[in-house]
Every structure is written in C-alpha cells, then in structure tokens.
Image: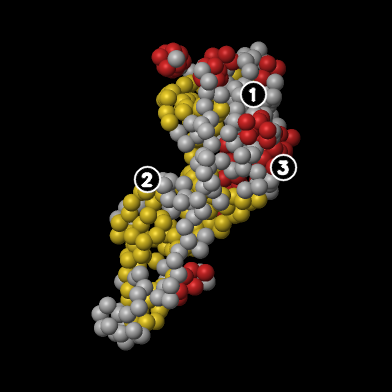
Amino acid sequence: MVDGLIAAAERLRDAGETAARFARDPVNLPMIRTWLEAMGDDNPAYERKRIAPPAMIQVWTMRGLRPAHDGPVGDGPAPDGPVGGDATGGDEDPLQVMSALLDDAGFGAVIATDSAQTYHRALRIGEEVTVRSRLESVAGPKKTSLGDGWFVTTVSTWLVGDEPVAEMTFRILRYKPGPKPATIPAERLQPVITADNAFFWAGVEAGELRLQRCGECGERRHPPGPACPVCGSFKMEYDVSGGVGTIHSYVVHHHPPVPGRRGPFTVALVDVDGVRIVGEYRGPRPAIGDPVRVFFDDRLPVWRPDVPTLDPWTLEVTPTLIVTTALATRDHQNVHHDRDAAVRLGSRDIFLNILTTTGLVQRFVTDRLGPATVVRSIRIRLGAPCHAYDTLTFTGQVFPHGVEVTGRTATGLHVSGVVEVTS
C-alpha cells in the first residue's frame, strides 16, 4: 500500500501543473456580499472599489456541492472529510487524486493544517478566474495526535487571462482516526498561593507585575520569600514593575505533557528590574536579549515581544457561524454542518473550516488597522480545531515583516500566522 501511494505521488508530482480550469462564476457582488456577511466583515472598501476580499481567492474555484456540474473539466467527487476540494483540474487534480487514493487506503478523515496565500492584486467584479495546481509533496505514513496519516501539499496559482493574481501553498492531513483518550484531560495547573507570594498573585489578578523588595535595604528578589537574602530583614514590601524586560534564556517544551496544556510552547527566563522571572513566551521564535513585555492571560503572567499590539478580538463561535461561513466559502464538507458526521470522524462537534479561519484573520487585521489596509499575504497554521460553542480570541503583534496573529480557544492555540499588509 505504501509503495503504491508513493508511486502515485511521484507520478502526479512529475506531471507538473494541471491545465487551467475556469471558476464556475465570474467574480461577482452577490458572492462577495454573502462572504462578508457570513464573516461579519463590515469593511466598506470592497463594495466601494468593486473588488473581492483577498482571503476569498480560494472560494472562486471551490468545487461546490455538485462538482459534476462545474463544467467540462473535472467532474470527480469532492473528497470526504473536513476539507472541500478546489476546482483545479478534474480527475488529474493532485489534491483530488491523492485524496481518493488515501480514502481507498483507509485514511478517510481529513483536516487542513497550513495555508499560505500571496495576493498580487485584488480581483475585480466581472473578471473570469482560472486556477492551475500541482503536487508539491506527499509525506507519510506519520503518527499524529489524530491518528496515523499522510500529509499532502499542493501549490495553486490563480490567473486572470495570462496574469497570475494569487498563489497558495496548501497542506492537508489524511488520517485514520485514532482511539479517543480513555482518561479525562487534566485541568490546567493552578499556582500555589502562600503568605509569602500572595501579593504577587493579587497583582496578577489586578493586571500588575509586583516584585518583592526588602523594606530595609531595598534588595529585590524573585521568587518571593519570607526574608531578605542580603540583610536578613523580615520587612518585605513590593514594587509594581513596568513589565518590560529582556530574554535571558528560553526553551521550547515538547515533552513530557503538561496537564491542561497543548505542546509545544515556549518558556522564557526574563531579566526584568533586577530579577529573573520564568513564564510562557508567545510570539515568533525569540533570541537571547530580545525585548519583551508582560501581559496577563488566564491568571498568569505571559511574555510577548515588546512591539505594538492590536486590541484583542473575542468571537463566540456558534453553530450558525460555522455553517454560514462554510456555505459562503463553498465548502460543503459534512463536518462543517453535520454534527453526527463530525462525531463519527472523531470530532466532538462541527468546526470552522480553514477558509473561514483565513477570512477571520483578515477581518481581525483590517478591522484594527483600518479599511485602507491592503492585505498582501496571509500565512497560517492550524492547531486545535475551533468547535461550535468555543470562544475564539484573536491577538496581534505588529512587526516590520507583518502582523503576527494568534487565535486561541480554551483547548489551546487554534491558529497562528503572519499577515503582510500595506496602507
């Protein structure tokens, strides 16, 4: 089986790019309005300029509910599972071919993991779009937290006439759902509060980073203790730190598992106001000496790069949101609207598709930076699925290379990525 899958992948990769396939419809205002309404995106620039939102690029060539009616090129069924196929070239479309082969081999569940889209210009209403696709790689079998599976990566290029207008590298995981854990997941560990450190945790609740200081000699210390290690005084007080420091060292934790946490995550030792504090770090991979600033999340101090930040956005993910955005992105895979199918394939409920997550990331950035913002690229990686009734919180940090965005639910990181913008 493995040899046959690898041989098929090599054949598809050697075949190169597929023939161009037309989208079912020209770029049109009704689809744009439906997409904007489903995403809750009130940016007026799209209708005023008569252009499509960049994050819609994949929508125009999705295969839809009845792909046999998409036209003369490509009349095979869309793959089963959470990710809808792209209308990119019929029976020899690499994503469709590999999905069908892996489905036949028993890898019937599917989830998107990565999407990197680059936009050269906005699509204008009335334009006819075509897409070409090629297979970049197939890797497997791999053991994952969802079960044994194969990663399939494709590259698509969208064109208007002979002009490339956008590209995307897209990765899915085809897998056999593994057995569900027999034990109930442990709750996140909570701090142990004592008479010596109660002031510190009270500060965290108040949104302050409080550092212990000797009332006699002024020596600061952390972690807190009952007496000054320099003069021996028991007169202990505290200062409120500005919360800005530098990374002294860090480690990316993969194993062993930490109760209530999904790895990997980064733990940093931070120099701040004469002491060193250990805490989680969130942001791009750091370097020793990088400036960081504290913030507070789930009653814990957390460090992030000392750069401008976007105001957080909290979204209640309802079943209606999941279903309407799936339809607006022309993704009719059952796990985005049929709870029974989602549970049968190993999920606890229906969940957002990757096209929706991409659209929400775009909305978050343009809502915060303003309607004049032009999105040049969106590169995201998915983590924990975002299910119905989850609360999804987006945060963003502004770097020279783009806006680093994360979206988290109670179960962990749902999405991380970078949005490149110009104004």
What residue sits right under mark 3 in the picture? 320
What residue sits right under mark 1 in the picture? 63
Callout 3: helix, strand or loop? helix
Q: How many marks?
A: 3
Tell me which label, 1 or 3, sits earlier in the chain: 1
> Which image quadrant is residue 292 in?
bottom left
* Within-10-Å neighbours for mark 3: few <14, some 14–19, many 20+: few
Type of residue at label 2? His
What residue is shown at x 43% (from left), y 72% (from top)?
194
- In front: mark 1 or mark 2? 2
Residue 303, image x, y percentages: 42, 59
What residue is shown at x 40% (from left), y 79% (from top)?
238
Question: Please, is residue 118 above or below residue 260 in the view?
Answer: above
- In front: mark 1 or mark 3? 3
Callout 2: helix, strand or loop? loop
The answer to the question of whether label 2 and label 3 lie on touching residues, with beta carbons closer than 8 A, is: no
What residue sits right under mark 2 in the picture? 255
Question: Please, is residue 24 above or below residue 245 in the view?
Answer: above
Type of residue at label 3? Thr
Residue 367, image x, y percentages: 61, 52
* Within-10-Å neighbours for mark 1: few <14, some 14–19, many 20+: many
Distance Cα–Cα, label 2 vs label 3: 37 Å
Tell me which label, 1 or 2, sits earlier in the chain: 1
Callout 1: helix, strand or loop? loop
* Within-10-Å neighbours for mark 2: few <14, some 14–19, many 20+: few
Question: Please, is residue 134 above or below residue 116 in the view?
Answer: above
